[in-house]
Amino acid sequence: MLQYAAQQQRVVLAFNEGDFRRLHAENQRHSGILCGDSELPGKAHARKQAKRIDAFLKANNLNSRIEKLPPA
């Protein structure tokens, strides 16, 4: 998945941070990995979460980086 996302120049949103930190360590040439909250959101929370993710991605270039979404 990480390789496909890199080919498409897309950031991966991951909820299993440990696995993606391992993949990042193995290959740091990708379009970015953003580790999000692991809770399952309801509709209202999902909208809020989507806005947080959008704002974070607009403010940060994640090329070849892995970051954790800051708390709200």
Image: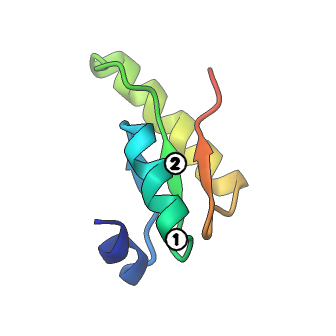
CA gap, disc 2 and disc 1: 10 Å
From the viewer's perspective, tell me whether residue 30 is left or right of residue 12: right
From the viewer's perspective, tell me whether residue 43 is left or right of residue 68: left
Vertical comparison of 21 with 18: above or below: below
Q: Which residue lies at the image location 51% right of the left edge and 36% below the top edge? A: 51
Q: Mark 2 points at which residue?
A: 34
Vertical comparison of 9 with 1: above or below: below
From the viewer's perspective, tell me whether residue 55 is left or right of residue 22: right
Question: How dense is the environment of label 1, judged by Cα within 10 Å: few (below 14), some, or many (20 and up)?
Answer: many
Amino acid type indicated by mark 2: Leu
Q: Which residue lies at the image location 63% right of the left edge and 45% below the top edge? A: 56
> Disc 2 vs disc 1: Cβ atoms closer than 8 Å?
no
Question: How dense is the environment of label 2, judged by Cα within 10 Å: few (below 14), some, or many (20 and up)?
Answer: many
Q: Which residue lies at the image location 39% right of the left edge and 18% below the top edge? A: 45
Q: Mark 1 points at which residue?
A: 31
Residue 18: name its quadrant.
Answer: top left
In terms of secondary structure, where does tag 1 sit?
loop
Q: Nearer the viewer, residue 17 or 36?
A: 17
Q: Which residue lies at the image location 42% right of the left edge and 76% below the top edge? A: 6
Amino acid type indicated by mark 1: Ser
Residue 9: name its quadrant.
Answer: bottom left
Q: Nearer the viewer, residue 52 or 28?
A: 28
Give coordinates of residue 38: x percent, y percent. 38, 25
Which of the labelled discs sits on residue 14, or is there none? none
Q: Which of 50 and 64 is in front in this view?
A: 64
Badge count: 2
Residue 60: name its quadrant.
Answer: bottom right
Q: Give the quadrant of the N terminus.
A: bottom left
Give coordinates of residue 27: x percent, y percent. 50, 71
In terms of secondary structure, where does tag 2 sit?
strand
Q: Give the quadrant of the C terminus.
A: top right
